[in-house]
Image: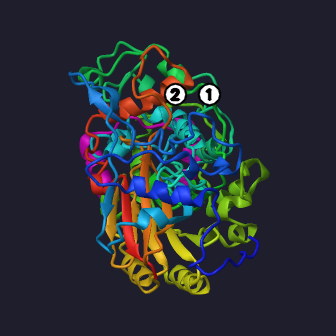
Amino acid sequence: MPAPRRGPRRRAVLALAGSAGAAAAVGSASAPTSAPAAPASPAALPRHRHGGAPPGPAAVGAPHAGTTLTGVARPGGEGPFRRLETGPGWRRVVRSDLARGDARRAARGVPLAAFVQFTDMHLVDVQHPLRYEYLRDRTTSAWRPQEALSVAGAVSLVERVNALAGGPATGASLSCVVTTGDNTDNNSHAELDWFIKVMSGGRIRPNTGDPRLYEGVQDSGLAAFWQPDSDVRDRDKALGFPRMRGFLRAAIREVTSPGLALPWYATVGNHDALPGGCFASARSRGFLADFATGGRKLMSLPGETGARLWQAVEKGLDPKGLHWEEVLRSQRRHMREVTPDPDRAPFTPREYVRALTAPRARGEGPAGHGYTEADAEEERLYFSFRISENVRGFSLDTTRRDGHYAGRLGEAQLRWLERQLKRHKDEYALIFSHHTSTTIPEGGTRLVELLRAHPHAVAWINGHSHLNRITAHGSFWEISTASHVDFPQLARAVELVDNRDGTLSLFTTLIESAAPHRTDFSDLSQTGLASLYRELAFNSPGARTGLAGDETDRNTELLLRKP
């Protein structure tokens, strides 16, 4: 990565087009919390959205159009299977836990940075032999009825970001998209290829094995899973899930992504680094690597055996997957034959970086999306990058390569971050990681202490929990965002503003995909599948509720003292 360009001291601000209007937009976005945010004035909008063509007429004067400020998917009607409709938007809430701003800050505030966070997309190869759908009764993450449509849903999210007129609160140009991990689900080459094409553009066939057929649990005839194409009275149809002829054929049909119209950066998560998100890399386990690419798949498991297996995973008793391997060996005669596929092989950290640095992955850039060839050689998955003239991002690797889904931050990485924060003390710092402060048993407390010791570190942005939560940490905000696989399937825009009154504001705005809220079971087009992805997620039996968080965790203005 080239040496960073030294910017002016942090008290200087960007010369944005229409900065006076942008300041006014900040004021309308932080209006009294009893009312939704008002639209920004046309002057607030940058001349070039995303650094490209000017916004079209529909975008002018409405930078928050298409966000949860204007409308949110909600259930309507009755019955066990609820259809979605468009409900009222979520208001913006001002949080003054860390500082109180001047009431006139809106008139003089100047935007410093605006970007979008994607997290926990979990692009899923639903036919992968190492998936453990047979643990559905132990954890809802083992199998979800919507996950066969994860690629269509992710492409629709890209389409939404491309349509944004600018930062929803300020109208400032969006500089980039940053993912905070679990971009893939099974740590497989096929899923990594799909992720890159979703983000950078291309044609994706979300199918492995036989190119003509789906060979997973949803055509197995097992009543434990939704069988959309058949008349089997499965447990999900008993809860109102529809019979949909052609669903599986449509789910593996080619999808086209336009690619982001913004540069993007990729933070790593435990599902990107570990098979199943919790077992040590299969590169050192010949059996698991062979099983991933082989011709057998386990689809059911006796209850007691499954209970013991999941208990070992939850308690971190099987980080190398030895018990899992034993179970798979013992169940061989109960497995279904499937078509082998070498693209299901697990990828190593080195292969992950090299896939991102390949020319085909570039899209809108930057080359490597944060990583370099040196990172590949050293298998180093953390980096720094410039977000704007006065703002720098630091992407961390919180995965445990020795196995387990909990996070870890080692001494070497913490020392690196401390050196970086000192080196860039004249820039505001935003920290990105997959795991949260409560899910990093080793190193999480140290990271909080480190950020508190450097007041120019204003936010820590993460995912993993699939839950919207915003936490004040004395001198900085921790912004945790829900996933894009579980309902309500959200991403988040973040904007940093200098209020010129001794305070800063972080505006957070949640966004849904571009797919319509209302679905049509007969519409199996790419857009129709993206809508269905959301509705199936809402109705997923046993799924966690309340992942949208409280209103103080959603659309906010987060005040903090200027260092």
Task: Provide the residue span drawn in magenta.
Answer: 287-311
The correct choice, above or below, for 84 with respect to 429 in the image is above
Q: Secondary structure at mark 1?
A: loop
Instruction: Return the x and y of residue 495 as percentages of the image width and height.
Output: 50, 60
Q: Secondary structure at mark 2?
A: loop
Q: Amino acid at mark 1?
A: Asp
10 or 144, which lies in front?
A: 10
Identify residue for label 2: 215
Q: Is residue 297 magenta?
A: yes
- The residues bearing labels 1 and 2 have C-alpha atoms spaced at a distance of 8 Å
Q: Is residue 15 magenta?
A: no
Instruction: Return the x and y of residue 340 as percentages of the image width and height.
Output: 61, 36
Residue beneath the point at 63% across and 61% down? 16
> Would you say 334 lies left or right of 433 here?
left
The correct choice, above or below, for 171 with respect to 68 in the image is below
Instruction: Return the x and y of residue 299 as percentages of the image width and height.
Output: 40, 35
Question: Circle 1: is it few (<14), some (14-19), or many (20+) Cα within 10 Å?
Answer: few
- Occupied quadrant, residue 365: bottom right
